[in-house]
Amino acid sequence: MNISYKLLDTSKRGSLPSGDLPFGALRTDHMFVADYHDGEWHDPRIVPYGPFEILPGAMCLHYGQTLFEGIKAFPHPDGEIYLFRGDENIKRLNHSARIMLMPEVPAELQMEGMMRLLDIERNWCPKEHESSMYVRPFMFATQDSLGVKASASYTYCVMLSPSGPYYKGGFSKALRLLITKQYHRAVSGGTGSSKCGGNYGASLRAQAYAATKGCSQVLYLDAANKYIEEVGTMNHYHVMKDGTFIIPEFNDSILRSVTSLSVLELGQAGIIKARTEHIALDDFLAGLKSGDIIEAGGFGTAAVVSPVGTYLLEDGTEITVGDGGIGKHSRDLYTYYSGIQTGRQAAPQGWLLKVPRYV
Ligand code: COI
């Protein structure tokens, strides 16, 4: 693939600040960009990070034809940087593209774009515990048109954000979640299984509502308020007394978290016990009360494993999970999983790809 480079002079490049990193706020010096028009992808390039020129009529600004991914890369003890399960995110980006009537981005274009960018920006890769290079591929519609239809042109971009943990304090504090019957993230037949920007814009109101009740996120139910679906930006899990992780069965209103897929694969390999299930809210609450369910939380790329200590119902009832802190199974899984990501634990075949040294 012919990727062109227009790089900043070394003297104009930035560097990683010292101290604790925020999540998602920092940028590196460059980004990868490619444009789609006339039915093809054109001009893949690495250029300095900076503004796009789009017209006010660009369709992404009006009708929300945008999507994104979130992937992490980690420095390993061998001094190299490894991308974690990027191939799964590449497939998911194209799944989102099909749902949003956007063009698929060829897997080689996505992978080489990410890898070449990571190679150039390797000095930005943070080494602190719980930090990573967060890779953010995204695509948006650029055609200048006000007709409601799929755009004829798009831009695909990858930018990097050296990041600390998603929740401040990292894996040290259990979350408090609001179970809402008032707000919904997605419905059957909608766009819930895609990572389109609209799903996240639509979630802000529920998140703000949760904050008014001292909760960091909401637990979403299906539109009939019967089954458990997702947690804020994560998949939900709970742990049964025998240590089995249960994840809500995937459907077209749930995003397939790569973390959940990985946990299920660890289950298939016999390393942990994990399965999916259609989980009725009433059964879940009864399980928490009886002690059959001993832990719960969320899985996601950004937040990894985020245990929940308390669920709040909209009538004010509080339900504590276990002793309200971080349970053993969640902690063990987090340690094992982050060990794989950072090269301290053997990884299943194909989960980590070394960033090549191209330049
Ligand atoms: C991720 O886990 O990558 C997410 O989707 C969270 C992101 C919206 C910050």
Image: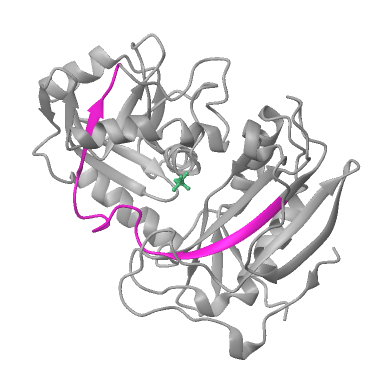
**Foreground pick, 38 / 351:** 38
Seen from this angle, which residue lies furthest right? 38
On screen, 251 above or below 19?
above
Q: Farthest residue in the top direction?
A: 224
- The quadrant of the picture occupied by the N terminus is bottom right
Q: Nearer the viewer, residue 239 or 33?
A: 33
- The number of discs equals 0
Residue displayed at 68% across by 77% down: 357
Which residue is rendered at x = 40% and y = 67% of the image? 344
Q: State which quadrant residue 274 falls in.
A: top left
> Observer-nearest residue: 309 or 186?
186
* 165 part of magenta stretch: yes
The reply to whether residue 292 is visible in this rendering is no
Identify the residue at horizontal 17%, vertical 16% (top origin). 286
Q: Nearer the viewer, residue 100 or 93?
A: 100
Provide residue 232's location: percent of width, then percent of height: 37, 35
Q: On the picture, is 184 further left or further right than 154?
A: left
**Image quarter hosting the C terminus:** bottom right
Q: Is residue 287 above or below residue 351?
A: above
Is 159 colored magenta in this rendering? yes
Could you tell me which residue is drawn at 44 percent across and 43 percent down? 266
Relative to 327, residue 1 above or below: below
- Residue 250: x, y in percent? 49, 25
Q: Residue 287: percent from the left, percent from the top?
A: 19, 20
- Name the outermost residue toward the front: 56
What's drawn in magenta, residue-wise? Answer: 156-181
